[in-house]
Image (spheres, rainbow, N blue to C red):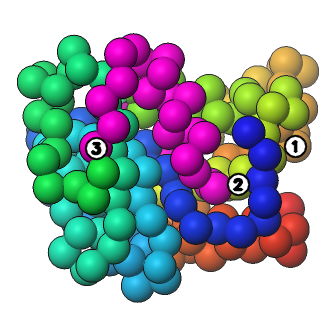
């Protein structure tokens, strides 16, 4: 994976469950509208439900392009979205993650659960290892991800993580800041 310094497609990692706060799905919808306005295509896990479904629906409603990547065994469980521009059905989680990363120029994390955390840490640790240089932002509404920020800071204080690696993912408050941060980092304007 390499960065061509152009943002055309953004991968969004977020929760697949409907059980989270409605505000998180509204945040996802706001991000989706902004992405379509800016001509940014969405790459995501291909589901119809939860925060994932909300971001995809908003991009589509605003006339944007959406690519979903979903393993065949999750088509039922995560309610594969039939209305996306392109739905790629793959055979494994590893293939899904590799394909999502390959198709994307940057990554945005919204509220979610364990799957979201796993996806975030993979792209952060791959950046740390120099396997890609695509920008990453975590949207932290109402402090949802504060405890994650604390874990990263604790690892720095203990000497297990370098400050610059703990800051590979930029924590931001809202969807606009996430897109602005990715754009600035993609062009190398800000750390
Ligand atoms: P969650 O945050 O648990 O709702 O999961 C968000 C998305 O991450 C869902 O599409 C899950 O299928 C996906 N996911 C869960 N575990 C993994 C994993 N180990 N690798 C990649 N994606 C995962």
Residue 80 falls left or right of residue 62: left
Residue under the image location 85 percent in, 62 percent down: 191
Q: Residues within 10 Å of mark 1 (few under 14, many from 20)?
A: few
Q: Nearer the viewer, mark 2 or mark 3?
A: 3
Q: Residues within 10 Å of mark 2 (few under 14, many from 20)?
A: many
Residue 48 falls left or right of residue 148: left
Residue 23 is at least partly visible in this image: no
Q: For residue 158, what is the image quadrant?
A: top right
Q: Earlier in the sequence, mark 2 or mark 1?
A: 2
Residue 111 spot, x, y in % from top left: 37, 46
- The extreme bottom residue here reads 37
Q: Is residue 94 magenta?
A: yes
Residue under the image location 64 percent in, 56 percent down: 105
Q: Is residue 88 magenta?
A: yes
Residue 120 is at least partly visible in this image: yes
Q: Which residue is mark 2?
A: 135
Q: Earlier in the sequence, mark 1 or mark 3?
A: 3
Residue under the image location 19 percent in, 75 percent down: 61
Q: Which residue is mark 1?
A: 164
Residue 30 spot, x, y in % from top left: 31, 73
Residue 75 falls left or right of residue 101: left
Residue 169 spot, x, y in % from top left: 68, 47
Question: Does 103 sit above or below residue 89?
Answer: below
Q: For residue 80, what is the image quadrant?
A: top left
Residue under the image location 22 percent in, 40 percent down: 47
Q: Which residue is mark 3?
A: 87
Callout 1: SS: helix
Please give the range of residues in magenta: 87-113
């Amino acid at each position: 994976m390499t960065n061509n310094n152009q943002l055309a497609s953004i991968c969004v990692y977020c929760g697949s469950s409907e059980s989270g706060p409605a505000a998180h799905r509204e945040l996802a919808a706001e991000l989706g509208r902004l992405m379509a306005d800016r001509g940014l295509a969405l790459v995501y896990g291909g589901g119809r439900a939860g925060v994932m479904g909300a971001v995809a629906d908003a991009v589509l409603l605003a006339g944007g392009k959406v690519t979903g990547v979903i393993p065949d065994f999750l088509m039922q469980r995560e309610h594969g979205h039939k209305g996306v521009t392109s739905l790629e059905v793959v055979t494994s989680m590893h293939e899904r993650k590799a394909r999502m990363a390959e198709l994307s120029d940057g990554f945005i994390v919204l509220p979610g659960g364990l799957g979201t955390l796993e996806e975030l840490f993979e792209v952060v640790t791959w950046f740390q290892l120099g396997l890609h240089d695509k920008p990453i932002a975590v949207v932290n509404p109402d402090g949802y991800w504060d405890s994650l920020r604390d874990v990263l800071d604790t690892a720095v204080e203990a000497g297990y993580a370098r400050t610059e690696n703990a800051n590979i993912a930029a924590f931001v408050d809202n969807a606009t800041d996430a897109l602005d941060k990715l754009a600035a980092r993609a062009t190398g304007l800000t750390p």
